[in-house]
Amino acid sequence: MSDEIKSIGVLTGGGDAPGLNAVIRAVTKTAINRYGWSVIGIEDGFEGLLGQTMIRPLTLDSVRGLLPLGGTILGATSRGHFSVLPPSIEDLRRDPFYKEAIDNLARLGIDALIVIGGDGSQSIAYNFHQLGTRIVGVPKTIDNDLAGTELTFGFITALSIATEAIDRLHTTAESHDRVIVIEVMGRNTGWIAVQSGLAGGADVILIPEIPFSIEKVVAKIIEREQAGRKFSIVVVAEGAFPAGGSRVYQTGGKRLGGIGQVVADDIERLTGKETRVVVLGHLQRGGQPKPFDRLLASSFGSAAVDAVAGRCYGCMVALRAGEVVTIPLSEAVGAIKTVPPRGYLVRTARNIGVCFGD
């Protein structure tokens, strides 16, 4: 493989997040305007590199208008045929799907690949890097749980949507003397829950990092009732679970969801108060990215192209101390960034009277 870069590929993996299209736009414009490279968009994530490849040329014209657009023009996908487990390098070399994808990258004339995705996608990217593919990662997850970067684009937009929802639900809860339980995203971490709960004035916040006791939650609601506050707002991350219990999954047991209803049922049973549940779900993923996410996504996309130009392969761009830097992909995969139970966010919430159910 020649050391010269003439053409790069870009794909998006995993779920959508506000700002994905801004990254694609920045990658394309930086590659063309600064380096004179051609850019190939790979559709449907890594799956687009198998069989009859699904690609589209990306030009300055084709990325016009993408900055405020939600979703991804390239489509996102699950892990599909690619394992994110850490097999041995010998197993990777024998894997027919990785071999086919790498052969197709060469056939398409793609000299380096930029992968926009979360932990699963970056783990796959790291596997490709181990096999010799020129890879640069761009971190993406609305959960903000990817190790190695202080923030991921999409998180601020999701946080804003969740906070606005809590603001709106405050008025109806107070008007009707109800308890309202709001279930937000957060499979393994509670970044959205704790920050939206703080910003929205929640009374109870339940996160995966702090297993809860429903009795403690109920005690908080009764305490408010006795103080003349006839309503309560409870924010629950979808991955939260009771001490000694387990996470709640939807029918079929594959997708998290339903802890909000479990908590609401218990609250109503133990307090007699009318309790309603609102599950924000994919509302947190959709719509236009907020200005900050547009800026961060654009910075990440441009920096990823600069990393390719600097031959910084097997790395991921990241935000640290307000600067966009590159870190080894190995630092970003295999671990998640969790909410510190004794960190400043939880301390602040406790200081102002928020209950975490512990």
Image (cartoon, rainbow, N blue to C red):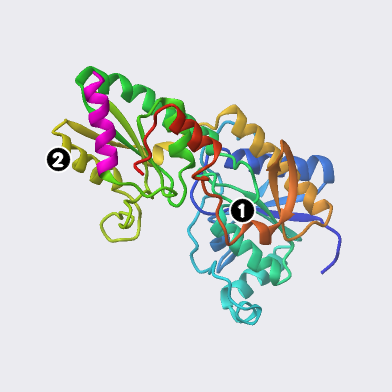
Residue 292 in the image, given as x and y percentages of width and height? 61, 30
The answer to whether residue 286 is left or right of residue 212 is right
Q: How far apart are marks 2 and 1 (CA)?
A: 48 Å
Indicate the quadrant containing the C terminus: top left, top right, bottom left or bottom right.
top left
Residue on which disc 1 sits: 11
| Residue found 54% across the figure and 46% down from its top | 141
Task: Please state which of residues 79 and 167 is positioned toward the viewer in this rendering.
Answer: 167
Asked if the stretch drawn in magenta spans residue 223, the answer is: yes
Looking at the image, which is closer to me, 199 or 86? 199
Foreground pick, 114 / 36? 114
Q: Circle 2: is it few (<14), some (14-19), or many (20+) Cα within 10 Å?
A: few
Q: Within 10 angstroms of label 1, few (less than 14), some, or many (20 or more) residues? A: many
Comparing 33 with 173, the one in front is 173
Residue 240 in the magenta stretch? The answer is no
Q: Quadrant of residue 194?
A: top left
The kind of residue on which mark 2 rests is Arg
Q: In which quarter of the image is residue 336?
A: bottom right
In the rendered structure, the answer to whether residue 176 lies left or right of residue 36 reads left
Q: Name the residue at 28% across, 54% down.
A: 250
Instruction: Please indicate whether residue 335 sits to the left or right of residue 241 in the image.
Output: right
- The reply to whether residue 134 is visible in this rendering is yes
Residue that carries the numbered disc 2 in the rendered image: 269
Q: Residue 279, how many percent across, how many down?
A: 32, 39
Q: Is mark 2 on a helix, strand or loop?
A: helix
In the image, residue 350 above or below residue 177: below
Q: Nearer the viewer, mark 2 or mark 1?
A: 2
Left/right of residue 266 with respect to residue 113 in the rendered view: left
Task: Tell me, yes or no, if residue 107 can be seen here.
Answer: no
- Image location (x, y in percent) of residue 127: 64, 68
Residue 186: percent from left, percent from top:
43, 46
* Region in magenta: 215-230
Which element is circle 1 on?
strand
